[in-house]
Amino acid sequence: MLKAFKVLKASVTVNEQLVSSINSGLCLLVGLSVDDSDEDIQWMANKLVKLRLFDGGACVADNRLEILSVSQFTLHASLKGNSLDYRKAMKSSDARDAYQHFLNTLSQLHHPDLIKDGRFGEMMRVNIENDGPFTINLDSKIRK
């Protein structure tokens, strides 16, 4: 599952140090579940690159726009009383490899120099200047 934000700009800092930043494009919050397969990851990357979200029905590839991807396991949290349960989130060791596969797939489908990343497993400050606002959810288990 991922959330895609159409942005004017976005950035990631870790320990007050800038890690990545983009101008116009998409900022992604990517959460991988225990059920996500390589096929699901491929589908999400393909769909994301082809979505016509920009003026004139353009996609990110048409306009050579940047993508900033940030891993966020909390997207799969569920409530358990007043606490959060993360059982649906992929375990960190598997998620690191799966997330890297997602980034590699994006780089194959889009311009690799336009794909930026946060830092997997780190506490990050993500700044998103949403354009619209425009945010979509993309779930490989609900394919349309």
Image: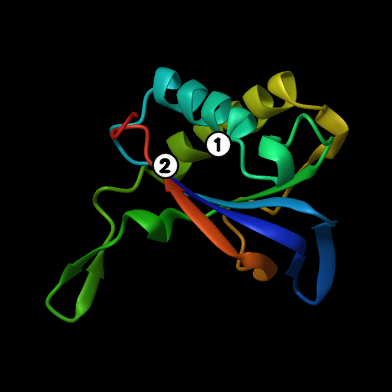
At x 72%, y 40%, the residue is: 56
Location of the C terminus by quadrant is top left
Image coordinates for residue 113, horizontal then vertical, percent: 87, 34
Image coordinates for residue 132, horizontal then vertical, percent: 63, 66
At x 68%, y 53%, the residue is: 119
Q: Does residue 100 appear in this view?
A: no
What residue type is disc 2 on?
Leu
At x 51%, y 21%, the residue is: 42
Could you tell me how far apart the alpha carbons at marks 1 and 2 are, in whole angstroms? 8 Å
Q: Does residue 82 appear in this view?
A: yes
Mark 2 crowd level (few <14, some 14–19, many ≥20, 10 Å Cα): many
- Secondary structure of residue under mark 2: loop
Image coordinates for residue 36, horizontal then vertical, percent: 35, 31
Q: Which mark is residue 8?
A: none
Camera-nearest residue between 57 and 135: 57
Residue at the left extreme of this rendering: 81
Camera-nearest residue between 81 and 115: 115
At x 22%, y 76%, the residue is: 83
Please state if 3 lies on the left or on the right of 76 as rendered.
Answer: right
Camera-nearest residue between 96 and 136: 136
Please tell me in which quadrant of the rendered image residue 133 appears. Answer: bottom right
Please state if 4 lies on the left or on the right of 103 as rendered.
Answer: left
Residue at the bottom extreme of this rendering: 82
Question: Residue under circle 1?
Answer: 99
Q: Which mark is residue 32?
A: 2
What residue type is disc 1 on?
Tyr
Mark 1 crowd level (few <14, some 14–19, many ≥20, 10 Å Cα): many
- Rendered view: 44 above or below 10: above
- Secondary structure of residue under mark 1: helix
Please state if 89 lies on the left or on the right of 99 as rendered.
Answer: left
CB under 8 Å between discs 1 and 2? yes
The earlier-in-sequence mark between 1 and 2 is 2
